[in-house]
Image (cartoon, rainbow, N blue to C red):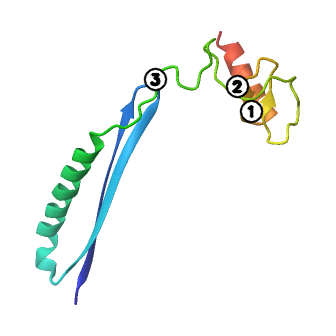
Amino acid sequence: MAIKLIANYSKRLGLPGYSSHQFSVSVETELLATDDLEAESERLYHLLQSNVDQQILETGFVPPSTYGMDESGAPTGGQSENRSDSSPNNITRWPNGTAWKCSDKQRDLVLKIVAENQ
């Protein structure tokens, strides 16, 4: 009777600007006897670990610290328009163009916490 052995290895690395990247790999094999289980598990772990470590060295795009900000340093978001209490996509817009991608109740809680801690 064959035994199915599935091994997974994943790694996530933090990058500047609250960014991160991750690489994960999985492999599936069949063993003929349980005698091979420990050795095969160890072999697969080291194989997957070394391959993930090699691949994750390629960071690709790393956003700069100002990514997603306009020239004033404010987060970019919606169009310039007056605040509306119930926009179609549940996004509260402010006259300066920044958008809250949350409900009015969530926005009010965030503003309350900020005001209390200033």
Instruction: Report the amino acid beneath label 3.
Output: Pro
The image shows residue 67 at horizontal and vertical percentages of 53, 25
Cα separation between marks 1 and 3: 28 Å
Q: Quadrant of the C terminus?
A: top right
Q: On the rendered structure, is 105 left or right of 14? A: right
- Of tags 3 and 2, the one toward the viewer is 3
Instruction: Report the amino acid beneath label 2.
Output: Val
Which residue is painted at 47% across and 21% down in the image? 65
The reply to whether the C-beta atoms of the residues labelled 1 and 2 are less than 8 Å apart is yes
38 lies above or below 10:
below
Q: Quadrant of the N terminus?
A: bottom left
The image shows residue 72 at horizontal and vertical percentages of 63, 11
Which residue is painted at 80% across and 30% down in the image? 92
- Of tags 1 and 3, the one toward the viewer is 3
Instruction: Report the amino acid beneath label 1.
Output: Gln
User: Which residue occupies the foreground of this view, 66 or 109?
Assistant: 66
The residue under label 3 is 64
Which comes before the other along the chain, label 1 or label 3? 3
The image shows residue 12 at horizontal and vertical percentages of 36, 42
Q: Which mark is residue 110?
A: 2
What is the quadrant of residue 101 in the picture?
A: top right
User: Which residue occupies the foreground of this view, 106 or 23?
Assistant: 23
74 lies above or below 26:
above
Which residue is painted at 76% across and 22% down in the image? 97
The residue under label 1 is 106
Which comes before the other along the chain, label 3 or label 2? 3
